[in-house]
Amino acid sequence: MKKLSRSISTAAFAILLFAGAAGAGPGGPGRPLKLVLAPRSTVDPTDIMKNLSEKCPGVILTGNVKGSDYMLYAGGWSGEYRFMVIAKGGDTIYATKTVLLSNAVKDVCQFLSKRP
């Protein structure tokens, strides 16, 4: 089951990379900004979601690659977190490295809040 889940995540990532910038822009009136977690992320999604809901209530994690606005790579461990925001089409548009998970999420949130 775990292998199937990883395969689905990898396929979803590939779809996102080749999907290009087609589709609606991020957010929008009354619509939350949707992030899909990159398959190779090592940070627990529950911890990311907890911090997102506290620091950035207008941003949610989704499992729907096609319906997401950005992909979030969340790697590292306590004392060295590395987050990257990846646009549709595969371009890395933001990266941060912090000691605390909450600061990494806060940095991503601040970046996303400035996006059109």
Image (spheres, rainbow, N blue to C red):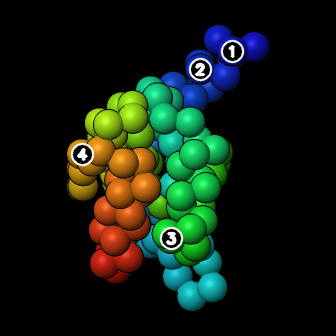
On residue 97, which mark appears? 4
Q: Is residue 24 visible?
A: no
Which residue is at 27% across, 47% downward? 98
In the rendered view of the protein, which quadrant contains the N terminus?
top right
Residue under numbered circle 3: 56
> Residues at badges 4 and 3 in contact (C-beta under 8 Å)?
no
Label 4 and label 2: CA atoms lie apart by 25 Å
Label 1 Cα crowd, 10 Å radius (few <14 / some 14-19 / many 20+): few
Q: Which residue corresponds to the image point at 24% horizontal and 45% vertical from the top-left? A: 97
Residue linked to disc 1: 2
Labels 1 and 4: the sequence-earlier one: 1
Query: For the residues carrying marks 4 and 2, which lies nearer the camera in this image?
Result: 4
Are the residues at dot 3 and dot 2 in contact (C-beta closer than 8 Å)? no
**Disc 1 residue type?**
Lys
- What distance separates the C-alpha of mark 3 from that of mark 2? 27 Å
Mark-to-mark CA distance, 2 and 1: 6 Å
Identify the amino acid type marked 4: Lys
Q: CA distance from mark 3 to mark 1?
A: 30 Å
Residue position for label 2: 6
Q: Amino acid at mark 3?
A: Cys
Secondary structure of residue under mark 1 = helix
Q: Residue at x 51, y 25 (%)?
A: 10
Neighbour class for label 4 at 10 Å: few (<14), some, many (≥20)? some
Residue at 45% of width from left, 43% of height from top?
A: 16
In the foreground, 9 or 50 = 50
Quick check: 46 left or right of 55? Answer: right
